Image (tube, rainbow, N blue to C red):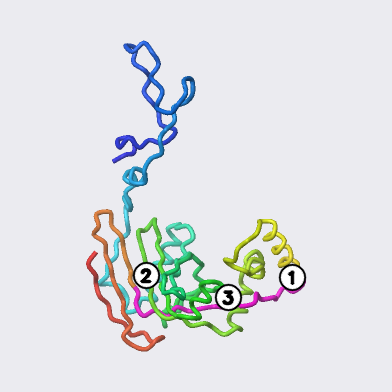
Amino acid sequence: MAAEEEGLGGPGETRPAPGPESGREPAPESGTEPGTEPRLEPRSVPELLLGRPPMARPMPTFDAEAAPAEPGPLFVDWLAGALDAGVLDPQVVTLSTVDADGLPDARVLVLRDVDALGTGWVFSAAADSPKGRQLGDHPAAALTVYWPQLGRQVRVRGTVERAADLVAAAEFATRSPAARIGALVGRQSEPLASPAEYEEAVAVARRRLEATPDAVAAGHAVYTLWAHEVEFWQGDADRHHVRLRYTRTGPVRTPEWSRTLLWP
């Protein structure tokens, strides 16, 4: 139902003019002074959401029976489809880890590569960041990506392996100068006294990179999430979602998988 029908018009909504039979201006809303604009009460979260049903648009189809035997090629195909469809930041994924207390933690980061044959998802992080420390203590993670325009979600779960420092240095060199400067600043997620403190650290890192173009941030690490389970989810406005789960049946890095169709 449209927002107007639900009474959810925004601050720019039009109000009906007073009828000629009233002969007077409408009474101001509660909490407003005479001669001032009426104050609109904040809308509740359910009111904000009810007028915007998810996936109310044409969606691509997904023939699970025609899917490949391994999840890697299917993910690459879906990623390419997201790029072709103009999905914003299709390489941005959510990485979930577990902290020292066993509590889940999650953040978005950039996917760097996919080993389609061995089915490994590659990303980078600072080893001394919260996620780096969590992966060091418990090298397992989940990765989730959602492409809204296509209504497609992919969920990956598995073990994480840190690559050699030479691999991390080579990956660091492919980054933009701004990304390298940010990594050289370091101290990710630590308390910041003021924006000026950060700007000063950025200036120092910039000078360092200019003097040593091949500098690599201390602790910069590349990780591969080797999937044990991968689920492909194609959304549908009528909830006729198609879900296909791949489960590894062989050792890590071998293309041995079983496939299971799941209830929506």
Tell me the residue that label 1 is attached to.
208
Q: In which quarter of the image is the C terminus?
A: bottom left
Tell me the residue that label 3 is attached to.
128
Tell me which residue sits at (41%, 31%) in the image.
13
Tell me the residue that label 2 is attached to.
155
Find residue 76 and report its horizontal and vertical position in percent: 42, 71
Name the kind of residue labelled 2 in the image: Arg
- Relative vertical location of residue 233 with respect to residue 140 in this rendering, above or below: above
Q: Residues within 10 Å of mark 2 (few under 14, many from 20)?
A: some
Q: Nearer the viewer, mark 1 or mark 3?
A: 3
Find residue 159 and report its horizontal and vertical position in percent: 42, 81
For marks 1 and 3, give the CA distance: 20 Å
Mark earlier in primary sequence (2, 3): 3
Are the residues flagged by discs 1 and 2 in contact, CB closer than 8 Å? no
Which region is colored magenta? 209-230
Residue 164 vs residue 244: left or right? right
Among the 4 quarters of the image, the one containing residue 124: bottom right
Tag 2, which secondary structure? strand
In the foreground, 118 or 97:
97
Residue 148 vs residue 111: left or right? left
Tell me which residue sits at (49%, 76%) in the image.
134
Are the residues flagged by discs 1 and 3 in contact, CB closer than 8 Å? no
